[in-house]
């Protein structure tokens, strides 16, 4: 386990170099339902040493596993989670021959801004940009991108703006790119209720609440977003250490206020946001995953976003699974990464 005092000391992992499974070509568009069992608690991290690399405006903390010559996979976490969402997925993919990169997003863990003058922006464009600059820093030309929540949105953004850098996409929740104009419209009350913290963060009281009670608040979000995932305190505390990052609160607040039109965009990303506002479809091979118990999963078994994917595509619903899909259902998430390479 990694506690707060020993956050930077990661447990080492033996090298794994199993051969990559032979890939095949798939062309059918299918809809399938997958049964999965939530993971209750976890032991060893399965991660190698924590690394740092300068990438764009950040010094990014990340872990890497698998053979350096294997096909690259970037695993991207959400809010309020961290790299340990992929604690089981990482060694499984490494054992299949993938080069696995799991970075802390801006505002988490050991990822830090290189300059104190850089705006602590949380708008969607910056996360896609962060992924591309990280790939450049690690000399990764193309990769499978797989993520959920904020990480899934970042993956979708790169797939739209830089499709030449993406070999395949695994996106929990489907098409997550935000249209701020549409976001001004109310949604069903039950779904609005699930977004309680977004509206809380729109107030100064909410910002102070996150600062003061970040541990209790984020733990509550874990419980409400994943009602059948009975994680233990050690599992949560291991991830919660990443929220002690000094930029966690400002990036979080800016992200949720920006979505509601309550925070201004960074002018440097205006062109990017204008392109994203067009909601261009994704033409890359994609597997969309939905946790059936995720309060943010739209009804209709993926039908609400199906038109946003024009390439080879599959949709899978994971029964008895909530929001944190890779940690609750690591086998299903790992299989999706393997399968998308076959598309």
Image (tube, rainbow, N blue to C red):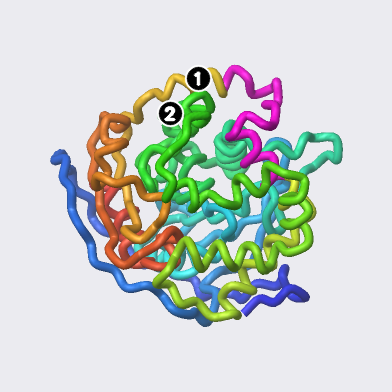
Q: Residues within 10 Å of mark 1 (few under 14, many from 20)?
A: some
**Which of 332/299 is in front?**
299
At horizontal 45% and vertical 61% (from top left) the residue drawn is 324
Between discs 2 and 1, the one toward the N terminus: 2
Q: Secondary structure at mark 1?
A: helix
Residue drawn at 34 percent across, 45 percent down: 298
**Residue identified by numbered label 2:** 160
Q: Residue at x 74, y 73 (%)?
A: 4
In percent of width and height, residue 146 lies at 42, 49
Q: Label 1, on which residue?
A: 275
Q: Position of residue 281 (x, y in %)?
A: 35, 26
Q: Which residue reaches farthest right?
A: 116
Q: Where's residue 308, x and y in %?
A: 32, 30
The answer, for residue 4, to whether it is visible in the render is yes
In three-dimensional space, the C-alpha distance between marks 2 and 1, rounded to whole angstroms, equals 9 Å
226 part of magenta stretch: no
Give the magenta part as a residue range: 251-272
């Amino acid at each position: 386990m990694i506690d707060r005092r020993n956050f930077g000391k990661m447990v080492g992992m033996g090298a794994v170099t199993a051969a990559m499974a032979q890939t095949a070509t798939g062309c059918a568009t299918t809809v399938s339902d997958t049964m999965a069992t939530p993971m209750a608690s976890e032991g060893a991290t399965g991660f190698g040493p924590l690394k740092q690399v300068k990438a764009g405006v950040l010094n990014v903390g990340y872990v890497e596993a698998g053979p350096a010559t294997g096909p690259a996979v970037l695993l991207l976490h959400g809010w309020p989670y961290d790299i340990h969402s992929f604690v089981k997925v990482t060694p499984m993919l490494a054992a299949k021959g993938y080069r696995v990169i799991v970075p802390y997003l801006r505002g988490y863990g050991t990822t830090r801004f290189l300059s104190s003058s850089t705006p602590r922006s949380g708008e969607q464009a910056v996360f896609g940009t962060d992924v591309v600059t990280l790939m450049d820093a690690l000399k990764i030309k193309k990769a499978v991108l797989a993520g959920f929540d904020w990480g899934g949105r970042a993956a979708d953004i790169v797939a739209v703006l830089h499709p030449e850098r993406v070999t395949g996409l695994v996106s929990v929740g489907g098409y997550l790119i935000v249209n701020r104009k549409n976001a001004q419209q109310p949604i069903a009350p039950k779904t609005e209720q699930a977004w309680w913290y977004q509206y809380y963060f729109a107030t100064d009281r909410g910002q102070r609440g996150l600062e003061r009670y970040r541990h209790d608040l984020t733990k509550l979000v874990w419980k409400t977003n994943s009602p059948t995932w009975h994680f233990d305190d050690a599992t949560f505390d291991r991830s919660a250490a990443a929220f002690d990052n000094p930029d966690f609160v400002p990036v979080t607040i800016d992200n949720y206020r920006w979505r509601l039109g309550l925070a201004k965009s960074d002018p440097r990303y205006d062109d990017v946001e204008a392109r994203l506002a067009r909601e261009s479809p994704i033409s890359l091979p994609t597997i969309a995953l939905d946790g059936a118990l995720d309060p943010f999963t739209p009804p209709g078994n993926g039908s609400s976003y199906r038109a946003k994917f024009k390439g080879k595509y599959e949709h899978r619903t994971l029964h008895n699974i909530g929001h944190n899909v890779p940690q609750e259902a690591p086998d299903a998430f790992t299989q999706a990464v393997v399968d998308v390479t076959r598309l």
